Image (tube, rainbow, N blue to C red):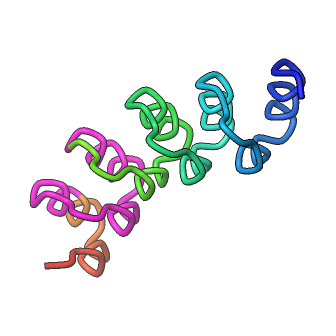
Amino acid sequence: MEETKILEMIKTNPMAIRNIDNPTEEMKLLAVEKNGLLLRYIDNPTREMQEIAMKNNARAIEYIINPTEEMMIEAVNKGWSNLNYIKNPTDNVIKLAIEQRGWAIQYAKE
C-alpha cells in the first residue's frame, strides 16, 4: 500500500499502526500524536515519540521502558494515579504523588 494512503488511514484510525509491518517514523509519530497509548505497539520508540505520547496521554509512561525522572514527574503531575504505571519510580516521584493524594501510597511498591 502507498505510504500516503497508510498515513491517511492512521489519521482516521490511529489504531491501524498495530497492523502495519515496518511502519515509518512518520507513521509512528502520527499514531502516538493521536493516541499516546499506542506507544505499546511501537518497538524501540525514540525519545521524541515517547515525549509526544506522554503529552497526549500521561499514562503512556506505562510503555516507556526507562523513563527519565522528568517523565515520571510529568506523569504524576498530570494525575497521581499514574504512579501505578511507573515501573521503578524514584523516591521523589513517590513523594510527589502522595503529596497530591494520600491514596497514591497504594501504588508505592516499597
**Residue visible at 71% across and 42% down in the picture:** 21
Left or right of residue 108, residue 18 in this image = right
Indicate whether 88 appears above or below 44. below
Q: Nearer the viewer, residue 89 or 39?
A: 39
Q: From this viewpoint, which residue is outermost toward the left?
A: 91
Give the image location of residue 38, x and y in percent: 62, 48
Q: Which residues are magenta?
A: 69-96
Q: Position of residue 56 (x, y in %)?
A: 56, 38
Above or below for 55 versus 94: above
Q: Position of residue 82 (x, y in %)?
A: 39, 60
Where residue 79 sits in the image (x, y, percent)? Answer: 41, 55
Q: Compared to 78, does 8 lie above or below?
A: above
As drawn, 68 above or below 90: above
Find residue 34 and report its image quarter: top right
Q: Quadrant of the N terminus?
A: top right
Q: Quadrant of the C terminus?
A: bottom left
Residue 109 shown in magenta = no
Residue at the spot 20% in from the left edge and 78% down from the top edge: 109
Task: Report which quarter residue 47 is drawn in.
Answer: top left
Horizontal relation, residue 93 to residue 75: left or right? left
| Depth check, front residue: 82 or 98 | 82
Left or right for 45, reference 95:
right
Q: Is residue 32 left or right of residue 60?
A: right
